Amino acid sequence: MTDRDPIAAAHEQWVDHGWSDAADGMALVTSLTRAHQLLVERIEDSLRPHGLTFARFEVLRLLAFSRRRSMPMSRLGSLLQVHPTSVSSAVDRLEKQGLVERLRLERDRRVVLASITTKGVEAVEAATADLNARVFTSPGLAPDQVRCTTELLTSLRQAHGDTVATRAQA
């Protein structure tokens, strides 16, 4: 006996209760939520040995990609599309781990920079290698499905007002 897909069963329940017009959307949203949970579990398993969460990894990766290996806290929040409090919290934890330090601009002492340390660079490179090997290279779909799904999700994000730059704009 095989287990029944609970999302397919919920879809049938939606139809049976007269909500046919919403059944496909419910299945989409529920499927996305479950897929997100499954991917987050894989990501966390990969990052845990490095003492990182995905939020902290993203901060480190962004800093490591930047030319100066530092950037204003406000710019980090904007690029990561998160609230300033979330950036501050992530940087606090990274600072306690010795992976990031806060600096002030000499020309404008009001600007606080987050700057990745040598230890931070080493940590993010190791974490990136693990994420690439354990998650990103093989997320669970064939390469053509990955590209197609990404395109579909980009359209969904745009439909909900997410700012999506094209490659030429980025």
Image (cartoon, grey):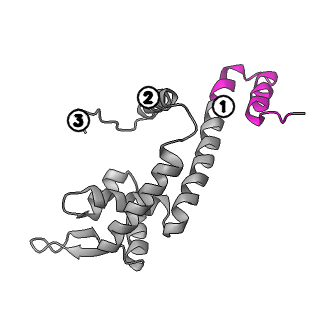
- Res 84 seen here: no
Circle 3: element type: loop
Circle 2: element type: helix
Magenta highlight range: 1-27
- Quarter holding the C terminus is top left
Residue on which disc 1 sits: 26
Mark toward the start of the polypeptide (1 vs 2): 1
Residue on which disc 3 sits: 169
Give the residue type at disc 1.
Met
Give the residue type at disc 3.
Gln
Q: Are marks 2 and 3 in contact (CB under 8 Å)?
A: no
Q: Is residue 55 above or below residue 120?
A: above
- Viewer-closest of 44 and 82: 44
Mark toward the viewer: 1 or 3: 3
The kind of secondary structure the magenta stretch mainly shows is: helix
Mark toward the start of the polypeptide (1 vs 3): 1
Name the residue at 30% across, 36% down.
165
